[in-house]
Amino acid sequence: MTSRWLLAAVASLLIVAARAEPQSPPIALDQSMIRVESQGNELFAMREAPIAYSTLEQMSTNIAGTSATRTAPVRVVRTSPPQEIDYLLCVTNGGTLVLGERIHTRAAGERRYVFARGAIVRSYPSLSVPEGWLWLVDVPLSRETTVTLQLRARAQWPLASVSVTMANVP
């Protein structure tokens, strides 16, 4: 009888230990990117976004060319029509954020996106905040969803990068 009791005690300890064993950690998400999806469209934004241009001349010369780099701090991938929209950033010496857009399209049945056009689309004066510059940028993702990004930087020029978060999200 004692061995049965001892066996039962050991078995219950093993069950408790198995339950207390830590579960495998969840798969880590890419914390360097913000990702939002709506109706099959996706927005990707770098949390530390590079500022590619410090003058409007640089931006306007480069943004319309087909040889510009494909790395973008903010990208929207649309399903219909199939497009990749790259948003590039310029901060002028007065603290104005200028948003450039490069659109790549894909023909039906094709796998690769091809450059279609590029242009400067909007500018944002900095909001007055004690820690430097702050810009609120609305990016249309779908008919129902517009994503508001907060871009922040110390008030110094030229800028190498800005910190990006989503508005109203902790």
Image (tube, grey):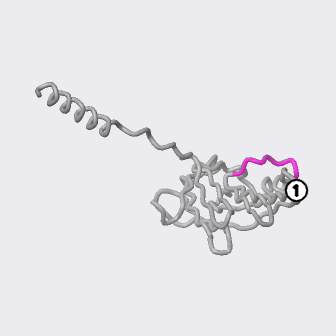
Image spot of residue 106 (x, y percent):
85, 57
Instruction: Give left or right: position of 157 versus 88.
Output: left
> Does residue 32 sit above or below 102 in this rendering?
above
Question: Which residue is rendered at x = 60% and y = 56% of the image?
Answer: 35
Quadrant occupied by the N terminus: top left
Instruction: Give left or right: position of 63 versus 4.
Output: right
Instruction: Give left or right: position of 152 versus 60.
Output: left
Q: Nearer the viewer, residue 113 or 11?
A: 11
Query: What's the magenta bit mostly, secondary-structure-wise?
Result: loop
Image spot of residue 125 (x, y percent):
62, 67
From the image, tell me which residue sits under label 1. 109
Q: Which residues fall within the magenta stretch? A: 65-72
> Does residue 87 sit above or below 30 in this rendering?
below
> Does residue 4 sit above or below 130 in this rendering?
above
**Label 1 Cα neighbours within 10 Å, binned few <14 / some 14-19 / many ≥20:** few
Question: Which residue is rendered at x = 45% and y = 59% of the image?
Answer: 170
Q: Nearer the viewer, residue 125 or 142?
A: 142
Q: Nearer the viewer, residue 136 or 61?
A: 136
Q: Amino acid at mark 1?
A: Gly
Instruction: Give left or right: position of 35 versus 13.
Output: right
Residue 68 painted magenta: yes
Image spot of residue 13 (x, y percent):
23, 33
